[in-house]
Image: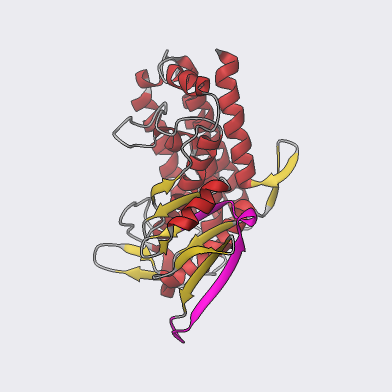
Amino acid sequence: MQLFVNSYGAYVHVKEEMFEIKTKQEASKELKINHLTAQKVTSIIMSKGTALSTDAVALALKHNIDIIIVERDGQPIGRFWHSKLGSTTKIRKRQLEASLNNVGLHWTKKWLSQKLENQCDFLHDLKKHRSNLVPLITEKIDAILSLKSKIENCQANTVKQVEEQMRGFEGSAGRHYFGAIANVMPKEFAFDGRSFRPAKDAFNALLNYAYGVLYSKTERAVMLAGLDPYVGFMHRDDYNHLSLVYDFIEPYRIHAERFVTRLFTGKKLNKSHFTFTETGVSLNEIGKAFFVNPYLEYLDSEHIKYKGRHQTRLNAMQQDAHSFANSLIKDS
């Protein structure tokens, strides 16, 4: 399981070789104490405003549990990780070579194409019970499929030679996609396209938070596969920029999008879950408490059929990360 600690003032330390989590209840001011054995924990996500002891860090490293520090909006900003490489350095060498030749282009096209295909599958699901929106959503699907074909047909020796072109196709697909989703939103949560930090509306505030959680899971997957999260193919190679994470996550964004959209269309959310200011909208503590555990269960407990096996969404991502890493060595 994943331990998400986001209550302000919460403290994680070790007692009798177990994680002990102390939180104060806002209403009663009483101290709540929970215990978890290290064998049951796969990762610990700590929000700003919480604390953990060095003993807790050491116990986590001993059991290969990564600890991720996130902003209040869920964006990961750092992590504790053991000092040993996850696997052979040959993978990282081949990864660097791939970033400079057509192997990187092949994988970029593959990930982006799968992302757009996932978008179309989701839109097909959305129009099943919305007969009044069938023409509009069908038009959006056709436009996305056309852009998917253009991405697949990009010809070059490296990603950099067609990077701007591919970004344009991906961006256009995103506008069609979120334009369709906007039409199925309840009126009080209407939105006009994507907005980032700060978000301009509740939908984008929650989606940004869901993406933030997913980024940390993606980084963990690529690191466990022996890959370098900083050496990507399409996203820029800026200082401390997790380029591969932003490349590799593309086919898996659909998990956040489906879950978030389902909450809004199912009228599970209300405005009390968000904070509205002049500068933007953010998910507040009530919203985080409502959202986090069901979302983590959706990612890491609920099983789907993937490549002939029943497994969780995060296990499927991990499997794909290992397959990608192994292909780099095999291709060499």
Q: Is residue 116 at least partly visible in the picture?
A: no
Image coords of residue 292 (percent x, y) = 52, 62
**114 or 153, which is in the foreground?**
114
Q: Nearer the viewer, residue 235 or 135?
A: 235
Q: Position of residue 273 (x, y in %)?
A: 43, 71
Q: Is residue 1 left or right of residue 260?
A: right
Question: Which quarter of the image is occupied by the N terminus?
Answer: bottom right
Depth check: 315 or 84 in front?
A: 84
Identity of the residue drawn at 46% across and 43% down: 81
Q: Position of residue 23 (x, y in %)?
A: 47, 73
Q: Is residue 218 above or below residue 5?
A: above
Considering depth in this image, is 66 or 150 the residue closer to the camera? 66
Residue 181 image position (x, y, % from top left): 49, 53
Q: Which residues are magenta?
A: 26-45
Name above or below for residue 260 compared with residue 245: below
Membership of 32 in magenta stretch: yes
In the picture, measured across the screen, residue 183 lies left or right of residue 200, that is: right
Residue 81: say if magenta. no
